[in-house]
Image: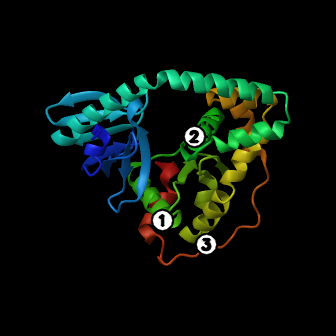
Amino acid sequence: MTAIEKYTRLEALGQWREVPDQSPREVVVSFGNASLVLSELNENPLCHWAMAATCRLSLDGSKAIYTPDTEGFETLEIDDAEMVEAIAQVSRAVVATERKTSWFHWVFLAMATAAIGSAFYATPSLLRGQAARMTGPESARKLGSDMVTTLGIDICRAPRADVVRELFQSRVFLESRALLLIARHQQHSSVFPGGIVVIGGDALQAMRTPNDLADLTTTLLAQSDLALEKLFEGSSTRELFEYITSGKLADERLAQAAQNITDSPEINDVAEFTSTIQPLLRDQDWVTLQGICLE
């Protein structure tokens, strides 16, 4: 029995912060295939952390803090001695497995690079297709997040309003892992790869009801995959080749694609959102969300 199989049924509660200035969110932590799975209390998955990339920042008795990135931007706090020990054992097992199979990955990478290299001079559509196939939900979210960052826009955050924003997300986006962001002093609303919907703060304040916001966000979200397609369509053959071999696009390309999105015309044909939850937000919660950029 492997370490991963041993702990497949082990779960614990944790405090997850997606960003440093965000209030901690209680989540259920469990094991996936060489990953940590973070889910809502209703078992709706939120994200996966690759076990090999998960780093423990601190340990105090049974309490440990982990991060999936080198900057410690996103964190997870667990106060459960058994889960902390399990994570340590599974992490060692994953690392050992990766070392044993590293030679295979190098051979595979060399073969893949040679194959892709031969396709470098083939039609760009082949490279775009390969780029799209290798871009999963998490990679698409990373591309979208990087694109938003290049714009240098001011994302509005406020503790009470963020709670309402997350409530709105859970009721409108349902099964999708969409992320709703509100941009200060912006009228234009856009959608980026990975389901990142950016609503202009000025536009939000002009809306009359939560349903107006739901209509616009769901209409934009439906075009998230199209935003990813346009990102690859506008990339050169060399840029696509570099993305396929490294998983990264140059900041200049991301910035150009992001600017193209913000410069595109506003959506006029907004679909009507229907929900079994009425109203979507209480009046006081709606006022709080509309004032997120005023705090």
For label 3, the crowd category at 10 Å Cα-Cα, with few meaning under 14, some 14 to 19 and many 20 or more, is: some
Q: Is residue 238 or residue 283 the one in the foreground?
A: 238
Vertical order, 221 against 30 (above or below): below
Is residue 187 among what the camera can see? no
* Disc number for residue 286: 1
Which quarter of the picture shows residue 7? top left
Vertical order, 117 against 199 (above or below): above
In what element is the residue under mark 2?
helix
Q: Nearer the viewer, mark 2 or mark 1?
A: 2
For label 2, the crowd category at 10 Å Cα-Cα, with few meaning under 14, some 14 to 19 and many 20 or more, is: some
Q: What type is the residue that disc 3 sits on?
A: Phe
Residue 71 position in % (x across, y down): 43, 26
Q: Earlier in the sequence, mark 3 or mark 2?
A: 2
> Residue at the spot x=57%, y=71% of the render?
211
Q: What type is the residue that disc 2 sits on?
A: Ser
Q: Work out how far the residue at label 1 is from the one at label 3, CA to CA, in angstroms.
A: 17 Å
Instruction: Give the residue at mark 3.
Output: 273
Q: Is residue 9 or residue 25 the one in the foreground?
A: 9
Is residue 129 among what the camera can see? yes
Vertical order, 227 against 85 (above or below): below
Which quarter of the picture shows residue 77? top left
Residue 93 position in % (x across, y down): 32, 31
Instruction: Give the residue at mark 2.
Output: 139
In what element is the residue under mark 3?
loop
Q: Horizontal placement of 162 versus 12: left or right?
A: right
Q: Earlier in the sequence, mark 2 or mark 1?
A: 2
Q: What type is the residue that disc 1 sits on?
A: Trp
